Image (cartoon, rainbow, N blue to C red):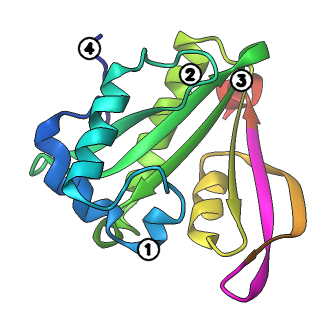
Amino acid sequence: MTLRIQTARLVQRRFTRDDAQDLLGVVSDPSVTRVIPEIEVSMEGVLNYIDMQNARVPFQLDTWFDLAIERKLDRVVIGLLSMVHKAHHQGQIGWALGVGYRGCGYVTEAASELIEYGFDRYRMHRISADTTSANPDSWKVMERLGMRCEAQLREAEFRDGYWIDYYIFGVLAAEWKQG
């Protein structure tokens, strides 16, 4: 299935094996491997991940589906955007962006279009995202997307010698259409 979601600066699409070097650069940073540990940080691990993702049916129920975030300017894959379609018209979204591309609005731009796609194409009722207190940039993106903090699980995870909180954000289709 051909899947391309375009914004002014980005293309979200299925990964190809040609993306392996760019993706390896993204996942080589510890801040990324912490949120997507299923990608082994090696060329072989990245190629296995790409093959696994390409074997999946897009947005199949209860299966994470990842899209490459490609910058139109230079056709470099700068990160990935994930969505899982859950029962009862629920969705969950996530992302990981290469360190050198953060702070430019790329995640907000890409995630906004994928949320729109989920509500429009799959008639999702609610889309959520989660993060931790150790990742304030991520929850600020969620707020910019119009998501609201629905839950805070205090000191839910012990990481690197500290207790961190866990946040769940969400937006309803009716809220999205108003926004």
Tell me how far mark 2 sits from mark 4, CA to CA. 16 Å
Picture disc at residue 30: 1
Disc 4, SS: loop
Q: Main secondary structure of the magenta part?
A: strand
Picture disc at residue 2: 4
The residue type indicated by label 4 comes to Thr
Task: Report the side of 61 relative to 75 (left or right).
Answer: right
Q: What x and y, as percent, mark residue 163?
A: 81, 80
Q: Which residues are magenta?
A: 159-170
The residue type indicated by label 3 comes to Ala
* Front-most of residues 4 and 156: 156
Tell me what residue is drawn at x 29 percent, y 50 percent: 45
Which quadrant would residue 104 be assigned to in this image?
A: bottom left
Q: Are marks 2 and 4 in contact (CB under 8 Å)?
A: no
Read off the residue under disc 2.
118
Quick one: label 3, few (<14), some, or many (20+) residues within 10 Å? some
In primary-sequence order, the first of circles 3 and 2 is 2
* Front-most of residues 86 and 52: 52
In the image, which is nearer the foreground, mark 4 or mark 3?
A: 4
Residue 57 part of the magenta segment: no
Q: Are marks 3 and 2 in contact (CB under 8 Å)?
A: no
Read off the residue under disc 3.
173
Tell me how far mark 2 sits from mark 1, CA to CA. 29 Å
In primary-sequence order, the first of circles 4 and 3 is 4
